[in-house]
Image: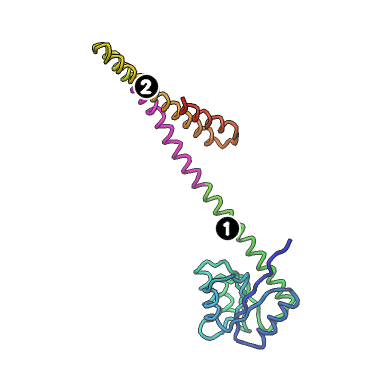
Amino acid sequence: MNTEPVYILLVDDEDALVGILASQLTDQFGYVTRIVRDGQEAIDLLQQAGTLPSLIITDYDMPNVNGLELTEWVQERTLGIPVIMLTAAGGGTIESASLRAGVYDYVRKETLDLQRLGLTIQSVLERRRLRSMEEEEKERQQESSANKEATDRLHAVVTNLQPSLMDGFASVHNGLDLLQQRTQQLSEGDRGTCGDLIQRMHHEVRLLEGSMRTLLELYAFTSSHHSHLERIEELLESTKKSRRR
Protein backbone atom coordinates (compact mmCIF):
# COMPACT_ATOMS: atom_id res chain seq x y z
CA MET A 1 0.00 0.00 0.00
CA ASN A 2 1.42 3.36 -1.05
CA THR A 3 1.66 6.05 1.63
CA GLU A 4 2.56 9.67 1.21
CA PRO A 5 6.11 10.53 2.33
CA VAL A 6 6.65 12.34 5.61
CA TYR A 7 7.00 16.08 5.01
CA ILE A 8 9.27 17.84 7.52
CA LEU A 9 9.55 21.62 7.80
CA LEU A 10 13.02 22.68 9.00
CA VAL A 11 13.18 26.10 10.64
CA ASP A 12 16.73 27.35 11.28
CA ASP A 13 18.87 30.33 10.27
CA GLU A 14 22.13 28.33 10.30
CA ASP A 15 22.34 27.61 6.58
CA ALA A 16 25.17 25.08 6.70
CA LEU A 17 23.68 22.97 9.47
CA VAL A 18 20.09 22.96 8.22
CA GLY A 19 21.21 22.27 4.64
CA ILE A 20 23.17 19.18 5.68
CA LEU A 21 20.34 18.03 7.93
CA ALA A 22 17.78 18.37 5.13
CA SER A 23 19.93 16.38 2.71
CA GLN A 24 20.58 13.58 5.21
CA LEU A 25 16.93 13.28 6.22
CA THR A 26 15.98 12.95 2.57
CA ASP A 27 18.79 10.62 1.53
CA GLN A 28 18.73 8.23 4.50
CA PHE A 29 15.06 8.26 5.53
CA GLY A 30 13.23 9.39 2.41
CA TYR A 31 11.62 12.37 4.14
CA VAL A 32 10.48 15.34 2.11
CA THR A 33 12.04 18.47 3.62
CA ARG A 34 11.61 22.20 3.24
CA ILE A 35 13.78 24.89 4.81
CA VAL A 36 12.75 28.32 6.11
CA ARG A 37 15.08 30.72 7.95
CA ASP A 38 13.01 31.82 10.95
CA GLY A 39 9.70 31.44 12.75
CA GLN A 40 8.00 34.20 10.82
CA GLU A 41 8.80 32.56 7.49
CA ALA A 42 7.40 29.32 8.90
CA ILE A 43 4.18 31.07 9.97
CA ASP A 44 3.83 32.71 6.56
CA LEU A 45 4.24 29.31 4.91
CA LEU A 46 1.76 27.58 7.23
CA GLN A 47 -0.85 30.27 6.55
CA GLN A 48 -0.74 29.58 2.84
CA ALA A 49 -3.13 27.11 1.31
CA GLY A 50 -1.52 23.74 0.76
CA THR A 51 -0.31 20.62 2.51
CA LEU A 52 0.73 21.07 6.12
CA PRO A 53 3.97 19.41 7.23
CA SER A 54 3.89 16.14 9.13
CA LEU A 55 6.46 17.53 11.57
CA ILE A 56 8.33 20.75 12.35
CA ILE A 57 11.95 20.74 13.49
CA THR A 58 12.83 24.23 14.66
CA ASP A 59 15.77 25.99 16.24
CA TYR A 60 15.01 28.05 19.30
CA ASP A 61 17.24 31.08 18.80
CA MET A 62 16.20 32.85 15.57
CA PRO A 63 15.45 36.46 14.54
CA ASN A 64 11.90 37.84 14.26
CA VAL A 65 10.02 34.84 15.71
CA ASN A 66 11.91 32.24 17.74
CA GLY A 67 11.15 28.55 18.01
CA LEU A 68 9.14 28.85 21.21
CA GLU A 69 6.90 31.56 19.73
CA LEU A 70 6.44 29.46 16.60
CA THR A 71 5.40 26.46 18.73
CA GLU A 72 2.89 28.58 20.66
CA TRP A 73 1.46 29.87 17.37
CA VAL A 74 1.01 26.31 16.09
CA GLN A 75 -0.64 25.22 19.35
CA GLU A 76 -3.01 28.19 19.47
CA ARG A 77 -4.33 27.34 16.02
CA THR A 78 -4.67 23.62 16.82
CA LEU A 79 -2.91 22.62 13.60
CA GLY A 80 -1.99 19.26 15.06
CA ILE A 81 1.62 19.49 13.86
CA PRO A 82 4.15 18.00 16.30
CA VAL A 83 7.27 20.10 16.96
CA ILE A 84 10.83 19.05 17.80
CA MET A 85 12.96 21.86 19.28
CA LEU A 86 16.69 22.21 18.62
CA THR A 87 18.50 23.78 21.59
CA ALA A 88 22.06 24.76 22.32
CA ALA A 89 24.16 23.81 25.34
CA GLY A 90 22.88 25.18 28.62
CA GLY A 91 19.34 25.40 27.31
CA GLY A 92 17.65 23.64 30.22
CA THR A 93 15.30 26.54 30.89
CA ILE A 94 14.40 26.71 27.21
CA GLU A 95 13.75 22.98 27.11
CA SER A 96 11.35 23.21 30.06
CA ALA A 97 9.54 26.16 28.51
CA SER A 98 9.35 24.34 25.18
CA LEU A 99 7.74 21.26 26.73
CA ARG A 100 5.20 23.45 28.51
CA ALA A 101 4.41 25.15 25.20
CA GLY A 102 3.60 21.81 23.59
CA VAL A 103 6.86 20.68 22.02
CA TYR A 104 6.89 16.89 21.61
CA ASP A 105 10.64 16.53 22.09
CA TYR A 106 13.88 18.47 21.96
CA VAL A 107 17.36 17.71 20.64
CA ARG A 108 20.61 19.37 21.69
CA LYS A 109 22.57 20.70 18.73
CA GLU A 110 25.96 19.85 20.17
CA THR A 111 25.03 16.16 20.39
CA LEU A 112 22.98 16.04 17.19
CA ASP A 113 23.21 12.58 15.67
CA LEU A 114 21.25 11.70 12.55
CA GLN A 115 20.36 8.13 13.57
CA ARG A 116 19.19 9.26 17.00
CA LEU A 117 17.24 12.11 15.38
CA GLY A 118 15.65 9.59 13.02
CA LEU A 119 14.46 7.54 15.99
CA THR A 120 13.17 10.69 17.69
CA ILE A 121 11.22 11.63 14.57
CA GLN A 122 9.68 8.16 14.35
CA SER A 123 8.77 8.27 18.05
CA VAL A 124 7.19 11.71 17.74
CA LEU A 125 5.17 10.74 14.67
CA GLU A 126 3.93 7.58 16.41
CA ARG A 127 2.97 9.54 19.53
CA ARG A 128 1.12 12.03 17.37
CA ARG A 129 -0.71 9.19 15.61
CA LEU A 130 -1.76 7.66 18.93
CA ARG A 131 -2.80 11.06 20.27
CA SER A 132 -4.91 11.65 17.15
CA MET A 133 -6.59 8.29 17.65
CA GLU A 134 -7.32 9.17 21.29
CA GLU A 135 -8.75 12.54 20.27
CA GLU A 136 -10.94 10.93 17.60
CA GLU A 137 -12.20 8.34 20.09
CA LYS A 138 -12.94 11.07 22.62
CA GLU A 139 -14.88 13.05 20.00
CA ARG A 140 -16.76 9.90 19.00
CA GLN A 141 -17.71 9.20 22.61
CA GLN A 142 -18.83 12.79 23.12
CA GLU A 143 -20.92 12.65 19.96
CA SER A 144 -22.39 9.31 21.00
CA SER A 145 -23.23 10.73 24.44
CA ALA A 146 -24.86 13.80 22.87
CA ASN A 147 -26.86 11.60 20.49
CA LYS A 148 -28.03 9.40 23.36
CA GLU A 149 -29.11 12.44 25.35
CA ALA A 150 -31.04 13.78 22.36
CA THR A 151 -32.63 10.36 21.77
CA ASP A 152 -33.65 10.07 25.42
CA ARG A 153 -35.25 13.51 25.31
CA LEU A 154 -37.10 12.68 22.11
CA HIS A 155 -38.23 9.39 23.62
CA ALA A 156 -39.66 11.25 26.61
CA VAL A 157 -41.50 13.67 24.34
CA VAL A 158 -42.94 10.89 22.17
CA THR A 159 -43.92 8.82 25.20
CA ASN A 160 -45.82 11.75 26.68
CA LEU A 161 -47.32 12.74 23.33
CA GLN A 162 -48.67 9.34 22.31
CA PRO A 163 -51.57 9.12 24.84
CA SER A 164 -52.62 12.67 24.01
CA LEU A 165 -52.68 11.90 20.30
CA MET A 166 -54.70 8.74 20.75
CA ASP A 167 -57.13 10.54 23.06
CA GLY A 168 -57.44 13.28 20.48
CA PHE A 169 -58.32 10.84 17.72
CA ALA A 170 -60.89 9.16 19.96
CA SER A 171 -62.46 12.54 20.72
CA VAL A 172 -62.71 13.34 17.01
CA HIS A 173 -64.45 10.01 16.34
CA ASN A 174 -66.85 10.59 19.25
CA GLY A 175 -67.58 14.08 17.98
CA LEU A 176 -68.32 12.77 14.51
CA ASP A 177 -70.63 10.08 15.96
CA LEU A 178 -72.49 12.75 17.90
CA LEU A 179 -72.79 14.85 14.77
CA GLN A 180 -74.12 11.81 12.92
CA GLN A 181 -76.88 11.44 15.52
CA ARG A 182 -77.87 15.08 15.14
CA THR A 183 -78.28 14.72 11.39
CA GLN A 184 -81.44 12.72 12.11
CA GLN A 185 -83.18 16.05 12.56
CA LEU A 186 -82.38 17.05 8.98
CA SER A 187 -84.32 16.31 5.83
CA GLU A 188 -83.60 13.01 4.13
CA GLY A 189 -81.49 14.61 1.39
CA ASP A 190 -79.44 16.75 3.75
CA ARG A 191 -79.12 13.83 6.15
CA GLY A 192 -77.63 11.66 3.40
CA THR A 193 -75.20 14.39 2.30
CA CYS A 194 -74.05 15.06 5.85
CA GLY A 195 -73.80 11.33 6.56
CA ASP A 196 -71.53 10.80 3.57
CA LEU A 197 -69.36 13.73 4.64
CA ILE A 198 -69.13 12.43 8.21
CA GLN A 199 -68.17 8.93 7.04
CA ARG A 200 -65.48 10.44 4.79
CA MET A 201 -64.15 12.38 7.76
CA HIS A 202 -64.15 9.19 9.86
CA HIS A 203 -62.13 7.51 7.11
CA GLU A 204 -59.59 10.32 6.88
CA VAL A 205 -59.17 10.40 10.65
CA ARG A 206 -58.62 6.63 10.72
CA LEU A 207 -55.97 6.97 8.00
CA LEU A 208 -54.25 9.70 10.00
CA GLU A 209 -54.52 7.63 13.16
CA GLY A 210 -53.08 4.56 11.43
CA SER A 211 -50.20 6.56 9.98
CA MET A 212 -49.45 8.06 13.37
CA ARG A 213 -49.49 4.64 15.04
CA THR A 214 -47.11 3.34 12.37
CA LEU A 215 -44.74 6.25 12.88
CA LEU A 216 -44.78 5.78 16.65
CA GLU A 217 -44.15 2.07 16.26
CA LEU A 218 -41.35 2.78 13.81
CA TYR A 219 -39.78 5.23 16.23
CA ALA A 220 -40.03 2.75 19.10
CA PHE A 221 -38.48 0.08 16.91
CA THR A 222 -35.53 2.14 15.69
CA SER A 223 -34.85 3.69 19.09
CA SER A 224 -34.35 0.23 20.55
CA HIS A 225 -31.16 -0.02 18.41
CA HIS A 226 -32.27 -3.06 16.43
CA SER A 227 -31.41 -3.35 12.77
CA HIS A 228 -34.22 -5.48 11.33
CA LEU A 229 -34.52 -3.70 8.00
CA GLU A 230 -37.25 -6.01 6.75
CA ARG A 231 -39.54 -4.93 9.58
CA ILE A 232 -38.84 -1.27 8.85
CA GLU A 233 -39.70 -1.78 5.18
CA GLU A 234 -42.89 -3.58 6.23
CA LEU A 235 -43.94 -0.63 8.38
CA LEU A 236 -43.21 1.83 5.59
CA GLU A 237 -45.18 -0.26 3.10
CA SER A 238 -48.08 -0.38 5.54
CA THR A 239 -48.13 3.41 5.65
CA LYS A 240 -48.14 3.63 1.84
CA LYS A 241 -51.04 1.18 1.59
CA SER A 242 -53.03 3.15 4.16
CA ARG A 243 -52.66 6.32 2.10
CA ARG A 244 -53.84 4.53 -1.08
CA ARG A 245 -57.13 3.34 0.45
The span shown in magenta is: 145-173
- Position of 124 with respect to 202 (left or right) is right
- Looking at the image, which residue is at 53% across and 36% down? 222
Between tags 2 and 1, which lies in front?
2
Q: Amino acid at mark 1?
A: Glu
Helix, strand or loop at label 1? It is helix
- Looking at the image, which residue is at 73% across and 73% down? 30
Q: CA distance from mark 2 to mark 1?
A: 59 Å
Residue identifier under label 1: 135
Q: Is residue 171 above or below residue 140?
A: above
- Looking at the image, which residue is at 72% across and 63% down? 2
Q: Amino acid at mark 2?
A: Arg
**50 or 20: which is nearer to us?**
50
Location of residue 14 in the rendering, given as x and y in whole percent from the top left corner: 62, 87
Which corner quadrant of the image does residue 41 belong to?
A: bottom right
Residue identifier under label 2: 200
Asked if the residues shown at circle 2 and circle 1 are in contact, with their CB atoms under 8 angstroms apart, the answer is no
Label 1 crowding class (10 Å Cα cut-off): few <14, some 14-19, many 20+? Answer: few
Q: Main secondary structure of the magenta part?
A: helix
Magenta-span inclusion, residue 161? yes
Helix, strand or loop at label 2? It is helix
- Looking at the image, which residue is at 28% across and 14% down? 191
Magenta-span inclusion, residue 244? no
Location of residue 51 in the rendering, given as x and y in whole percent from the top left corner: 59, 70
Q: Quadrant of the N terminus?
A: bottom right
- Position of 169 with respect to 104 (left or right) is left
Location of residue 54 in the rendering, given as x and y in whole percent from the top left corner: 63, 69
